[in-house]
Amino acid sequence: MTQAAPLLQVFNVSKSFDVPRRLGAPPGKVHALDDVSLEIAEGETLGLVGESGCGKSTAGRAFLRLIEPDAGEVWFDGENLTAAIPRRMRALRKRLQIVFQDPYSSLNPRQKVADMLAEVLTVHKVCPRAEFPDRIATLLAEVGLPPAAAGRFPHEFSGGQRQRLGIARALSVGPDLIVADEAVSALDVSIQAQILELLGRLKAERSLSYLFITHDLGVVRYFCQRAAVMYLGRIVETGPVRALLDDPLHPYTRMLRAASPVPDPAAARKTVQVTGEVPSPLAPPSGCHFHPRCPLATAACRHARPAVTDMGDGRQVACHLYG
Ligand code: SF4
């Protein structure tokens, strides 16, 4: 699928959650991920896009085994993560980090920044304790925070600064791959640009790879080399960002494009107007999950799941129009 050696390979990962009986509704199962496969090359940024509730965040967590997949395999740098014993997994965690949308919720409000970073350095045995002050000062400088930040509490920072703290914490253990889960979505546009610039610089300086989870196609166009489009737990289209956004193949990708600003008038003519909302993952539609919203749906779409078709030039699409 990609030119450089794959760093992360995801094969047929599925994950569902039991939902208990509530308010008269029977118990059920949320099908969050359904046979998801993708890969990220060394040094690549892959955008994972889709509407809210489509399974993107679950995917990011399942790929890092922060939640356990029900089925499928995840390989990292040639090693089967899904088969790693706990001690090996703890070692691999240093190379696999995550940055959340709301760093405040993942920061201890009673812990100063220096203590928070020292805790991570201790848990992961990154360096001798005597080196902590220098290491922490270097990390803060790397993410654009002043040395005095080490003595402050999380509530003393702005949203953008807190995201820099979240990035510093991820960097502290020397990762190779960072999952950025809607990492800039809650920020003002000007702050978004600063954080994206920071992530881009760190990628170049540290040879990082990113799985960049977002609902914002503008951010994907700016920041990612390739993108995977997810709908109700399934990947429906993947490809190089420019081709995927300028000439979307899957009707759902076209719908997402229709909802975004269109810099290319030729691309605008290929959009498909689709109405409706994402169905409940408690009861996903049969066949192609997108068929209730798709103006091009046929009888086959209601009954048969579309296979993934290789369209060449690094593009794949799961739709009966191309099978
Ligand atoms: Fe639409 Fe059918 Fe393609 Fe699904 S498989 S996106 S319903 S045309």
Image (cartoon, grey):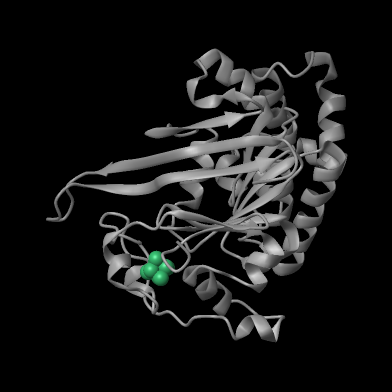
Figure quarter occupied by ligand 1: bottom left
- The residue lying at 32 percent from left, 42 percent from top is 17
Q: Quadrant of the C terminus?
A: bottom left
- In the rendered view, tell whether residue 254 sits above or below residue 308: below
Q: Residue at x 85, y 48 (%)?
A: 201
Q: Is residue 189 above or below residue 19?
A: below
Q: Is residue 69 left or right of residue 184?
A: left
Q: Quadrant of residue 14?
A: top left
Asked where in the image residue 291 lies, by quadrant, the reply is: bottom left
- Percent from the top left, x then y, of residue 205? 87, 40
Vertical order, 203 against 182 (above or below): above
**Residue 85 versus residue 22: which sits nearer the camera?**
85
Residue 131 appears in which quarter of the rendering? top right
Question: Do we see residue 144 in this rendering?
Answer: no
Can you say whether 90 is above or below 186 in the image?
above
In percent of width and height, residue 156 lies at 70, 49
Q: Residue at x 64, y 25 (%)?
A: 78
The answer to whether one can see residue 169 in this image is yes
Left or right? Give the position of 35 relative to 25: right
Percent from the top left, x then y, of residue 234? 43, 53
Measured from the top left, where is residue 292 in percent x and y?
32, 72
The residue most toward the left is: 24
